[in-house]
Image (tube, rainbow, N blue to C red):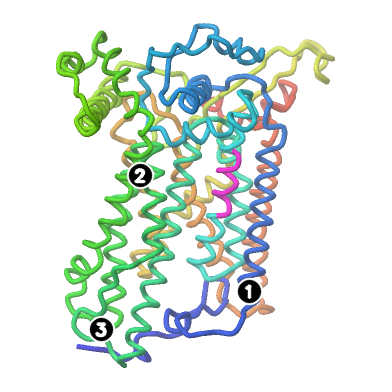
Amino acid sequence: MTATLETRETLSRTASGEVVPTAVERARPRAWDPDPVISWAASLGVAFLAAFLRLWKLDRPKAFLFDETYYAKDAWSLVHHGYVTNYVDNANTKILAGNLDGLWKTGDPSMVVHPEVGKYLIGLGELVAGMTPFGWRVVPALAGSLMVLLMIRLTRRVTGSTLLGLTAGLLMTFDGLQLVLSRLALLDIFQATFVLGAVTCLVADRDWFRARLARSAADDGTLSGWGPRVLWRPWLLASGVWWGLALGTKWSSLYPLAAFGLLFWFWSAGARRSFGVRWSLPRAAVADALPALGYVVLLPVLIYLASWTGWLMHADVYEQHLSHTQYGPYWGSYLKHDAHGFFPELVQSLRSLWHYHQDVWAFHTHGLNDATHVYQSNPLGWPILNRPVGVDAQLDIAPGAQGCTATGSETCLRQVLLLGTPALWWFSTLALAWSAIAWIGKRDWRYGIVVVGALSTWLPWLRFDDRPIFSYYAIVIEPFLILGATLLLGEILGRAAPGTQRRRIGAAVAGGIVVVIIANFAWFWPIWTDGLLTQTEWLQRIWFKSWI
């Protein structure tokens, strides 16, 4: 069975009322269009605004905040020694005083429990800007700004609307969780950026593939049989690179990779079915999903292994050190039967890396079973901000000190709190529920990105709710929540023509929601940026006891 293009492809409208060209229209040569130039200029403008907010007084507080005490020092060791070493007990004090001599114990490797990509990036900033708070935070700040740009471009592609794309970018720009994580040397902002980049490229591949099918159908008049087998897919290649970097930052990136791999298969099957291919699901599995394994499985694995090059080159140091610890007995066997020659040593290093991963896996699955932390939280409550994480607090600042305006017995304080913008997260949680309904009820593929992305980055954490896990892990969920919120804003804006009463009401409501979110961000700004507040002013921003 075949189908003509005219019966399968028609122009559609976005949620904001803009006309979206189909794959057929996009496949045709067009004269120069100023809209891409305007949209890119506006996108970069919002990204630069995000960068300004994230780089503003980035070195404050001048201290190691939360897990920066691990990642900043590990990153410095990684880029200088090739592997992560242990350090002396008073290393933090010496580093903040500018003394870096004799801090790291070469030959004494550290048992780090996360892959290396994020630490390499933190170390890159330290190489350029020095071993200072600014140095170890600058690359995370740039990554957070890039994440805003990716959010804009993904939303614009999904909706066909520059307005909605910029709205999504502004929502992310004015989120407190994304802001604070962009100003800390932790790994999560890198993981979130890489996952978002991977999904952005995967959606671009969806468009590219449909346009490719449209060109084939236009050349032949119809599509018959299996349709064309498209092996070269540049956007899928780019997605694989992003997935490799995400896995090389945190293993939990495997869940969205698997989920979007299935979604990619369904998208490919749907594309072939829309052009008349019968039995599209099994045929897409062979023609599209199977070749895609090279792009989104093999390539990420190779990138992941490459990120461990420093470890592989110094595997002998780990073999020597770990043979005297509580870790697996296999380490001692390497010393008794040491390999010689390039390939035997490479094989032994890869075996050592495998055993290292076994030990790290054991730590993640069993090593924290009895541990507790004051800021741990149940992942079910992350979207509604059940338990933020305090990364720094300076209490009991006396009146007059540091400009404190407190009177009487009241004092001032400074705080850095990992808390999302409440208005944004609560609205986005409602939008997630709407997205699930719209995906099923309206059969709108765009909402599938929201649901699959949010659930694959959120629900796996429910397995670990008996060990210390933290709400800021939800930063990887955030892009999909924001996409859902933006799609809902588009529904509120409506499809009516501009100037009609329906459009005016929709614009007022949608615009009002965005204004409330931005105002909410401004209100909480001091507790995200180490601002000076009186106790009264601070309590006005701590809305629930669980936020203390």
Mark 2 or mark 3, which has the lower sequence index?
3
Circles 2 and 3: CB atoms closer than 8 Å: no
Q: Residue at x 55, y 66 (%)?
A: 490
Callout 2 crowding tier (Cα within 10 Å): few <14, some 14–19, many ≥20: many
Q: Is residue 471 left or right of residue 212?
A: right
The mark lying in front, picked from 3 and 1, is: 1
Q: Residue at x 19, y 88 (%)?
A: 1
Which segment is the magenta one? 141-149
Q: Which mark is residue 286?
A: none
Q: Quadrant of the C terminus?
A: top right
Look at label 3 and name its amino acid. Gly
Q: Residue at x 53, y 55 (%)?
A: 150
Q: Eyeballing the image, is 239 above or below 125?
A: below
Q: CA distance from mark 3 to mark 1?
A: 33 Å
Residue denoted by label 3? 276
- Residue 226 at x, y percent in the picture: 20, 79
Callout 2 secondary element: helix
Q: Quadrant of residue 373?
A: top left
Q: Residue at x 26, y 78 (%)?
A: 228
Residue denoted by label 2? 303
Q: CA distance from mark 1 to mark 2?
A: 36 Å
Mark 1 or mark 2, which has the lower sequence index?
1
Residue denoted by label 1? 35
- Residue 534 at x, y percent in the picture: 75, 22
Look at label 2 and name its amino acid. Ile
Which of the pair 30/409 is nearer the observer?
30
Callout 1 secondary element: helix
Look at label 1 and name its amino acid. Asp
Q: Eyeballing the image, is 91 above or below 345?
A: above
Which of the pair 525/353 is nearer the observer?
353
Q: Is residue 98 left or right of residue 406?
A: left
Residue 143 shown in magenta: yes
